[in-house]
Image (tube, rainbow, N blue to C red):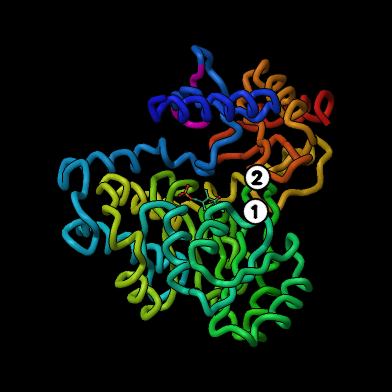
Amino acid sequence: MPPNRSLDALAREKLAKLESQQLLRRLHVTDPVGGAGVERDGRRLLNFCSNDYLNLSQHPDVIQAAVDATQRYGAGSGASRLVTGNHPLYEELENALARLKGTDAACVFGSGYLTNVAVIPLLAGASDLVVLDELSHACIHAGTRLSGARFEVFAHNDVEQADRLLRAHRAGHDRALLVTDGVFSMDGDVAPIEALADLAEAHDAWLMTDDAHGIGVLGDGRGSAHAAGCAERVPLQMGTLSKAVGSYGGYVAASAPVIAWMKSRARPLIYSTGLPAAAVAASIAALHIIETDRERCARPLALAKRFCEGAGLPAPESSIIAVVLGTPESALRASERLLADGFLVTAIRPPTVPAGTARLRITFTAEHEESDIDRLAEIVKTEIL
Ligand SMILES: *Cc1c(COP(=O)(O)O)cnc(C)c1O
């Protein structure tokens, strides 16, 4: 039997099983048509599941910056940043990130996922300890496993359990890293950052927050650690340029020596090609908007509040609202119901969320209209909850 025959057979078997469990995922062609609008299968829809919280991916200044940079520097960067891929825009972007985050320095990576896979194995190795929230993003779990460190997972936002784990295991390890999402991507709640900073300091652990859903939205756009009022106590503020910043890439904001160490030693920075200039230039333009347009930064959370009031849900902590429905079928059915009225809200199913907690994840972006929010809230309240 040719080798690909067994491969195809395995793939077919896996697909059939996923299909029978309603867990098969399909890629849908989705065409952005400006603001919060998209077109799918010939239909105009309002996108209520994008992470482009400020709609900056469609902002004319951001698009123009990408076009200009492409003309000036070309389409790709051609090499690792440590070889010749470090075009002049990187320094400007890293300075802007450090300024926004209030740190000495910042390092930009290929994506948010790559950032966690780069940084956690640099900071922790076989003789070290990583303690992380169970609902931390998949790439935090991936980076932790890759690090080879001992890792211990605490129940979601359970500071007391994190404390017990550090008490039990800290002494047997050289270094310790305490990691959490700042805003949890599938639940929309925020981490108890100040309490975690207390813990980290008490146990000589380094606190790292993943602010993928905080930058641009919380703390006047400066992120979840700033919103918690304790950014200076978070030595590793990680995040992405691919969500509210509207472009592509990932970053860590930290002290100058830590950033210099990352630039010299983090493997995805060494062995993967630098970002296209267009992505870096777009991020610079977007950060300028985030720094100067407070109103735009405040809008996603304000709209999430309006929605929750209308739907009779508890007040939100971020621009992400989880409507947990349980089974994959119920989440798919609710998503179809909203689609009928032109609202695009993808059903979120395991393994992205724990079994039994399939849900609608509704996100709010600056260019949503109040009237659409109210219509959506009414349907969710009367037909889904
Ligand atoms: C999306 C996300 C990432 C990954 O960022 P990308 O730039 O999309 O790779 C990392 N962490 C969290 C919490 C996320 O939600």
Query: Which residue lies most toward the top here?
Result: 42
Q: Quadrant of residue 25?
A: top right
Mark 1 within 8 Å of ligand 1, using the beta carbon: yes
Q: Which mark is residue 320?
A: 2
Residue type beneath disc 1: Phe
Residue range highlighted in magenta: 34-40
Query: Which residue lies most toward the front here?
Result: 1
- Whether residue 198 is visible, yes or no, is no
Q: Return the residue nearer the eye: 103 or 181.
A: 181
Q: Position of residue 185 (x, y in %)?
A: 62, 49
Residue found 68% across the figure and 20% down from its top: 336
In the picture, which quadrant includes the N terminus? top left
- Whether residue 373 is visible, yes or no, is yes
Mark 2 within 8 Å of ligand 1, using the beta carbon: no
Question: What is the secondary structure assignment of the residue under circle 1?
Answer: loop
Left or right placement of residue 199 versus residue 79 in this view: right
Q: Which mark is residue 145?
A: none
Residue found 51% across the figure and 25% down from its top: 9
* Residue 233 counted in the magenta span: no
Residue type beneath disc 2: Ile
Sequence-first disc among 2 and 1:
1
Q: Position of residue 228 (x, y in %)?
A: 64, 68
Question: What is the secondary structure assignment of the residue under circle 2?
Answer: strand
Q: Are marks 2 and 1 in contact (CB under 8 Å)?
A: yes
In the picture, which quadrant includes the C terminus? top right
Q: Residues within 10 Å of mark 1 (few under 14, many from 20)?
A: many
